[in-house]
Amino acid sequence: AWEVAPPSVLLCGPRRKLLDKSTPPPYKPRAHDYPHESNFTWMTHLFEANLWIASGKTRSQFHYDKEWNVNCLLSGRKRWIFLDPFQFEEEIQWARGKQFVRDNPLNNHWTDWMYLDPDHTDLIVQNKLRNADFWEIIQEPGDCVFIPYAMLHQVEKLDEGTQVAASWMFLPETMYDEEACQEAPLEEDLPLAAMDTLYMYTGKGLIPQGYNDPLNFVNALRAIMKQKKEKYLSLATFTRAVSDGDASLRSLKNRKQKIKAIFDLVTSFAKEPERGLRAAELKKVPLRIWCKPAAEGDSEGPLPCDRGEEYYFCDDQEFSKMKRHVQDVLARQTPRETKEVTGPPLQHTRVWKRKGGARDAGEL
């Protein structure tokens, strides 16, 4: 990850505020849930980063992600097909259904996909798609494609050779901040390893792709404590939170020992570790550590390649190395003149009107 760099244009999502998805559209800003441990407020919070390597011809499902996505191709050629669910949600035959929330999309329930081969679409079976608009692009080496959150897309590899691509995902609550951008090192790209990606991959164990947001896990844990009227987080409550559905920690032979070890780890951040974490202390545990129970306790279960694996988070030593590198980059930057922000305020639109509908995008 020290050899791969996200484009510097990704650096201006602030770490001071984001859109509050608990408020109705157009969503009000509030304090950021994922502050930077070294207070680099200009560093966009990357939720997930992926390196894609493939040979032969491959293609994805026709799906959408809950996050913004930037995909940069290093070698090979790819074809992308896009379909806007904000326009055609009612025409789409969803695989899961009732996951996409068009009028409140920051609260999409989860990802979804459609059973559709864009090269061989039966318009008798898929008759509602007769008037749907599709977009097609060809991605060449050096091209970066921005995929808006909730945008249905399918990507297909076009040749038999080796293809390499990198992608970065960040939450749709992320807002551009001109003031924070004044401090960003825009003269050179930061390596991916210097970015505090929420789900980092250390090179071993579970591959962190598509697992539960640790903040959602913490909020669910807090809700269980409230329901049970617990003053301190108990092992029983923690076990319940990481053993739901098809979670990895539900079926391991040594599950009790594994769960107890993770429980002891998070409890070590309590003021009184012998008693446990109070609900107000849950936020004292770094989110990079909460990633471990959030991934291993994800109720949807692991990816096939992750069965029996555990998640390894980056330790404090690695974070110190990242901080030193960023500080060195900042020291080499040419001071920039602070510019006054003019013009109308940004709308941060997250809901788009349906063609012919009564809802105006500017209102949301």
Image: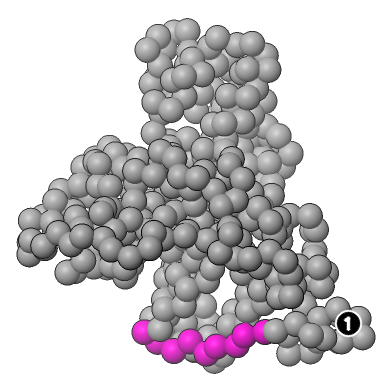
Residue 274 vertical position relative to residue 205 in the rendered view, above or below: above
Q: Is residue 295 left or right of residue 123?
A: left
Q: Is-magenta flag for residue 329?
A: no
Residue at point 46%, 19% (across, down): 280
**Magenta part of the chain:** 134-142
What percent of the width, then of the height, locates residue 179? Answer: 25, 54
What percent of the width, then of the height, locates residue 34? Answer: 40, 41
Residue at point 40%, 16% (across, down): 270
Q: Is residue 185 left or right of residue 227?
A: left
Q: Please name the residue that numbered disc 1 is placed on.
A: 127
Residue furthest right in the image: 124
Q: Is residue 196 left or right of residue 116?
A: left
Residue at point 63%, 74% (across, down): 153
Between 63 and 106, which is closer to the camera in this rendering? 106
Quadrant containing the N terminus is bottom left
Quarter of the image where one finds residue 194? bottom left
Between 220 and 257, which is closer to the camera in this rendering? 220
